[in-house]
Amino acid sequence: MGVTLEMPTLSTQQQNQSLLVPVGVSNRHVHLSEADLAALFGDDYQLQPLKELSQPGEFACREVVSLVGPKGVIEGVRIVGPCRRESQVEISLTASYRLGVKPPVRISGQLAGTPGIALLGPKGMLALPKGVIIAARHIHMPEETARELRLQHGSMVKVRVEGLRALIMEQVAVRVRRDFRLELHVDTDEANGALLRNGDQVQLLL
């Protein structure tokens, strides 16, 4: 007679808590390297935090730049700190039409083969050779929650959106880190299409 091994399961309370994911709507923004920050704002310039963002250590800055594309310009695009190893510009598909660029949908930091764009700051203009992306929708997830749900960094999941424009989002990337706060990040195009706002909740489908 064989032995059946049962995998541990979450309690009903744990499932209810872990399956509801708050939403963060991400507007267009720029991450800068230290060298590119200096080119746009001057040598030894330090970013000035405006407000903390939902993920630990990240903050919206007082500083803004203009995006200059082949077909148009978008002014007042906020910088998100702290500085990164490589500069990155995150825009929506709608914004890409206005600028005249064709960015791919990518996870943050995956910049190989992406188009560049010009950035205009108070102290100069910078031509980025690459770095423009449409951010892939993703869930920031703390390690403990990922273990409970048997997910890992890079897993793909689905989420259900309720309401007048109910839908299921597929190919949602899971990004795991010990200090992450649980949150689904979508851009403004996706949020508008599903009538989602900051703080709304969606259901993670396991």
Image: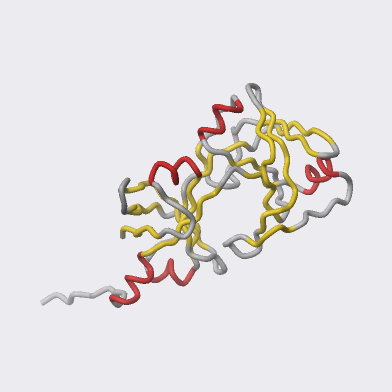
Q: Residue furthest right?
A: 43
| Farthest-out residue, top | 71
Counting from the top left corner in percent of width and height, residue 15 is at 32, 71
Could you tell me residue 87's position as x and y percent?
Answer: 69, 43
Tell me the residue at 17%/77% (across/down). 3
Q: Locate residue 155 relative to residue 51 in the image: left or right.
A: left
Task: Determine which quarter of the picture holds residue 204.
Answer: bottom left
Q: Is residue 76 above or below residue 175?
A: above
In the displayed structure image, the side of residue 132 where residue 21 appears, left or right: left
Q: Quadrant of residue 103?
A: top right
- Residue at 72%, 46% (x, y): give it: 32
Residue nearest the viewer, comparing 114 with 118: 118
The single residue placed furthest to the front in the displayed view is 164
Quarter containing the C terminus: bottom left
User: What residue is drawn where x is 41% and y is 62%?
Assistant: 21
Check the image and report above or below for 157 versus 97: below
Where is residue 44 drawn, in percent x and y? Answer: 88, 51
x, y (%) of residue 34? 79, 49
Query: What is the quadrant of residue 128 in the picture?
Result: top right
Indicate whether 23 appears above or below 9: above
Which quarter of the rendering shows the N terminus? bottom left
Here the colouring is secondary structure
Numbered-mark total: 0
Furthest-left residue in this view: 1
